[in-house]
Image (cartoon, coloured by chain):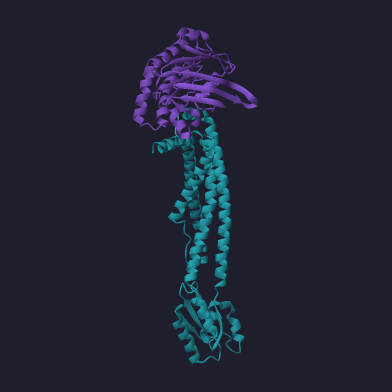
Chain colours: A purple, B cyan
């Protein structure tokens, strides 16, 4: 599913955010990416989302070399990925249902289909009763579940989460992780970046540890 | 099609959300179009008047006092055969004097002191509307000037050309001003739309990450500019219409005298449509400039 070969990201003044990363994540696998702050976890996810380009090496997703994609191909590639961030990134001026249906809407899906699919995933995360609420009226845990629902609305093959429990207490964190486990059980590849060692221990999945941009441990 | 529908829905809602700042952009476009529209109205009316004057062009052929009736007959025959005249009328010396006394009544007393009638006999020729453009009028006058019995000819075309030239200069200067104002209006639209764009950074980031097509990302900003331009243009035409009604109410009779019985008219529908399309184009250009920052 994801393969990198000698992948490096160098910022200005020769500073390596990632150095010589070679790893493989299989299809339908659930993998944690961990390490201390500044280890390069977010940079790796940004490269996967094509928000940045590698400085050296290659990165393949589903056999596609991300470095060779043009603008249209990048759009197509991103449609197969769901993303979840620590700060939720919900649109405050839209209702819960609109925040989710917004994704199929901007991909040109017909209106009735948008709402039906949005409601399905909202029901799946157990928040269908809050469909007309606004994000700021919800708790942190609820907001993250909405963000997960939004990530799933497009039936992605890969879900990427960057510190999805960073703003949540341990109980809610576990609840969110259980959602990711369920997503993975359906055959979707899940990659979660977190520095929460306890959570990783509780969930018990393969873990890749980064330190100063290099692989410290390939679980 | 969905991208267009989405763009207009989002553009309209953004326009409503930022209605305070959008009002500046709408006013800037309206102002530019009022200047352009007023200029078009003036030049269009002036062109209509010039065309009327051109179609009523006349020339005069003054005869020598000793011109014989055969010479006069030859002159009239030459005019008839030229194909440049619609009609002609002979004005005798006595008729010319009587006309002077009638048209300049306050100076009529002067004529009492004349030993002899100083006004020459003449033939007044009404020319075909196209005679000036195709050179027939000039050929006719050249021929008449060389004929025996003809003292002089007069054809006052120069002032019409001067008015036409002045009109052209005014139009060029006005267009330059309108273009300048349109650029300023587009920049204002771009600034206002870009302000709205800053407030929607997160939304745009999500759109990019889910792989939304560029038409969905940039479309709403172009649509917002388009709508601002359209509203500005409609405001401008309304303001011009109101101005036109006021001018006609206050100075209508005076203008009718100046125009020789004609009346000023508002811009034709075709030009109004051009103004609206122009406003929308300026607005869209501004929106497009702003949308380039939404990558």
Q: Is residue B57 visible?
A: yes
Quick one: quadrant of the N terminus of chain A? Answer: top left
Looking at the image, is B207 positioned above or below residue B158?
A: above
Looking at the image, is B175 positioned above or below residue A190?
A: below
Q: Residue at x 47, y 12 (%)?
A: A206
- Residue B175 at what x, y percent from top left? 55, 55
Q: Nearer the viewer, residue A64 or A79?
A: A64
Q: Examine the image and state in which quarter residue B151 appears.
A: bottom right
Q: Residue furthest right?
A: A13
Looking at the image, is A107 positioned above or below residue A203?
A: below
Q: How many marks?
A: 0
Q: Nearer the viewer, residue A58 or A48?
A: A58
- Residue B199 at what x, y percent from top left? 53, 30
Looking at the image, is B201 positioned above or below residue B79?
A: above
Q: Nearer the viewer, residue A48 or B181?
A: A48
- Residue A126 at what x, y percent from top left? 38, 16
| Residue B272 relative to residue A9: left or right | left
Q: Is residue B24 visible?
A: no
Q: Residue at x 45, y 9 (%)?
A: A203
- Residue B50 at what x, y percent from top left? 51, 66
């Amino acid at each position: 599913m994801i393969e990198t070969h000698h992948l490096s990201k160098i910022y200005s003044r020769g500073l390596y955010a990632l150095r010589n990363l070679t790893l493989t994540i299989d299809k339908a696998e659930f993998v944690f990416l961990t390490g201390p702050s500044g280890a390069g976890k977010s940079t790796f996810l940004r490269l996967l989302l094509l928000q940045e380009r590698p400085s050296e090496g290659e990165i393949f997703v589903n056999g596609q070399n991300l470095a060779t994609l043009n603008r249209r191909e990048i759009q197509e590639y991103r449609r197969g990925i769901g993303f979840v961030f620590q700060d939720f990134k919900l649109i405050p001026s839209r209702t819960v249902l609109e925040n989710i249906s917004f994704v199929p809407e901007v991909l040109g899906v017909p209106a009735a289909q948008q709402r039906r699919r949005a409601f399905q995933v909202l029901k799946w995360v157990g928040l269908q009763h809050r469909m007309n609420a606004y994000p700021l009226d919800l708790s942190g845990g609820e907001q993250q579940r909405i963000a997960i629902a939004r990530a799933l609305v497009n039936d992605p093959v890969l879900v990427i989460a960057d510190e999805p429990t960073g703003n949540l207490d341990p109980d809610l964190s576990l609840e969110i992780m259980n959602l990711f486990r369920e997503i993975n059980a359906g055959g979707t590849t899940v990659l979660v970046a977190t520095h929460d060692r306890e959570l990783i221990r509780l969930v018990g999945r393969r873990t890749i540890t980064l330190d100063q941009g290099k692989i410290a441990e390939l679980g | 099609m969905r991208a267009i529908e989405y763009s207009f829905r989002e553009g309209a809602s953004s326009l409503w959300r930022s209605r305070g700042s959008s009002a500046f952009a709408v006013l800037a476009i309206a102002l530019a179009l009022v200047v352009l529209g007023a200029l078009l109205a003036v030049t269009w009316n002036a062109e209509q008047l010039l065309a009327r004057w051109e179609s009523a062009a006349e020339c005069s052929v003054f005869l020598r006092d000793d011109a014989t009736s055969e010479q006069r007959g030859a002159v009239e025959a030459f005019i008839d055969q030229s194909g440049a005249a619609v009609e002609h009328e002979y004005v005798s010396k006595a008729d010319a004097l009587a006309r002077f006394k009638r048209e300049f009544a306050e100076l009529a007393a002067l004529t009492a002191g004349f030993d002899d009638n100083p006004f020459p006999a003449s033939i007044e020729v009404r020319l075909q509307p196209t005679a000036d453009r195709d050179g027939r009028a000039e050929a006719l006058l050249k021929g008449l000037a060389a004929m025996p019995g003809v003292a002089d000819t007069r054809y006052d075309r120069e002032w019409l050309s001067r008015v036409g030239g002045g009109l052209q200069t005014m139009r060029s200067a006005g267009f330059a001003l309108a273009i300048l104002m349109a650029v300023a209006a587009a920049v204002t639209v771009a600034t206002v739309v870009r302000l709205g764009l800053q407030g929607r950074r997160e939304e745009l980031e999500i759109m990019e990450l889910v792989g939304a097509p560029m038409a969905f990302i940039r479309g709403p900003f172009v649509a917002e500019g388009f709508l601002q331009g359209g509203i500005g243009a409609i405001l401008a035409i309304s303001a011009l219409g109101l101005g036109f009604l006021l001018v006609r109410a206050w100075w209508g009779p005076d203008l009718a005298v100046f125009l020789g019985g004609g009346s000023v008219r508002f811009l034709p529908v075709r030009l109004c449509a051009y103004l609206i399309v122009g406003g929308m184009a300026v607005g869209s250009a501004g929106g497009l400039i702003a949308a380039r920052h939404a990558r």
